[in-house]
Image (cartoon, helix red, strand yellow):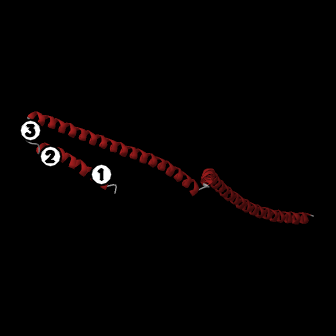
Amino acid sequence: MATQKPILEQQKSQMQIRMVKNSGVNSNYNESPLLRDDKDEEMSRSALAMFRAKEEEIEKKKMEVRDKVHAHLGRVEEATKRLAEIREELEALTDPTGKEVSMVRKKIDTVNRELKPLGLNCQKKEREYKEALEAFNEKSKEKAQLVSKLKELVSESEKLRMKKLDELSKNVEILS
């Protein structure tokens, strides 16, 4: 129905233009040139008035369309703003503990950075401990060997002294 109205108006304006043209063509050649000039002038004025009316109508419709476009753009802008607000709310709803999770992750990263040098220090201390334990065990083994050697030497020395005492004792008996 909305598309029929412009078509009807277009047909009406075309008929008016034809009538104006035909009225000039159908005029009697018997008329005086002065009358024809008046009629031509009147037709020109009429055609010009029709043209102006059409131009005004076109301009009026143009303004209506422009107003509708501006109104539609305003609604689109409002809808865009509302959609942006909805998106923000949706993102906030997606992860309500996001801040807490982020904070815990940061703390974990901090502890990891602190753990790394502590782990290296621990490994260094373990190496030092193993080296010290190995040195201690070697010294303990060396001490045990030396104690054993000392016992042997003391035992041998006692035997030799006992033997010497026995000999001296025999010599003393012989002399007496």
The residue indicated by pointer 3 is: 31
Is the Cβ of the residue at disc 2 closer than 8 Å to that at disc 3?
A: no
Residue at left 72%, top 62%? 145
The residue indicated by pointer 2 is: 22
Give the structural element (helix, strand or loop) at label 2.
helix
Alpha carbons under labels 2 and 3: distance apart: 16 Å
Alpha carbons under labels 2 and 1: distance apart: 24 Å
What is the x, y in percent for residue 116? 61, 52
Near-viewer residue (41 or 138): 41
What is the x, y in percent for residue 32? 8, 35
Query: Crowding near pointer 2: few (<14 within 10 Å), some, many (20+)?
Result: few
Near-viewer residue (50 or 118): 50
Near-viewer residue (131 or 169): 131
Q: Is residue 154 above or below residue 56?
A: below
Label 1 amino acid? Pro
Give the structural element (helix, strand or loop) at label 1.
helix
**Which sits earlier in the primary sequence, circle 2 or circle 1?**
1
Report the side of 72 relative to 156 (left or right).
left
Is the Cβ of the residue at disc 2 closer than 8 Å to that at disc 1?
A: no
Image quarter where the N terminus lies is bottom left
Which-is-in-front pick, marks 2 and 1?
2
Residue at the right extreme of this rendering = 176
**Which sits earlier in the primary sequence, circle 2 or circle 3?**
2
Image quarter where the C terminus lies is bottom right
Instruction: Write down the quadrant of residue 141 in the picture.
Output: bottom right
Label 2 amino acid? Asn
The residue indicated by pointer 1 is: 6
Query: Crowding near pointer 1: few (<14 within 10 Å), some, many (20+)?
Result: few
What is the x, y in percent for residue 170? 87, 66
**Which sits earlier in the primary sequence, circle 3 or circle 1?**
1
What is the x, y in percent for residue 64? 37, 44
